[in-house]
């Protein structure tokens, strides 16, 4: 959902490696671009939570 809001791949510019995988497992989530409607961010965060 972040890709739709920002037009970029989640964690764009970061290497897709074990460190990123561990950070995601520990709860890190991609950000949203400025101007993304709050209702969209809220829905996306609910979808990303385990």
Image (cartoon, rainbow, N blue to C red):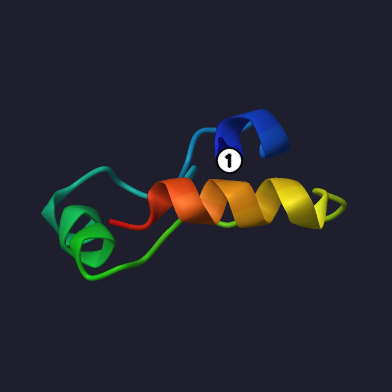
Residue drawn at 75 percent across, 52 percent down: 39
Q: Is residue 5 visible?
A: yes
Are there few (<14), some (14-19), or many (20+) residues within 10 Å of tag 1?
many
Residue drawn at 40 percent across, 50 percent down: 48
Q: Is residue 4 above or below residue 28?
A: above
Q: Is residue 26 above or below residue 17?
A: below
- Residue 23, x across and y down, in percent: 25, 66
- Residue 9, x across and y down, in percent: 51, 33
Q: Please tell me which residue lies in front, 7 or 40.
A: 40
Residue drawn at 58 percent across, 57 percent down: 31
- Residue 43, x across and y down, in percent: 60, 48
- Res 3 quadrant in image: top right
- Res 50 quadrant in image: bottom left
Left or right, 9 with respect to 29, comes to: right
Left or right, 39 with respect to 32, comes to: right
Left or right, 21 with respect to 35, comes to: left
Query: In the rendered image, which residue does mark 1 sit on?
Result: 2
Left or right, 25 with respect to 15, comes to: left
């Amino acid at each position: 959902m972040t890709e739709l809001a920002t037009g970029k791949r989640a964690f764009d510019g970061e290497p897709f490696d074990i460190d990123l995988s561990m950070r995601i497992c520990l709860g890190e989530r991609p950000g949203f671009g400025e101007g993304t409607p709050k209702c969209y961010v809220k829905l996306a965060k609910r979808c990303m939570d385990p």
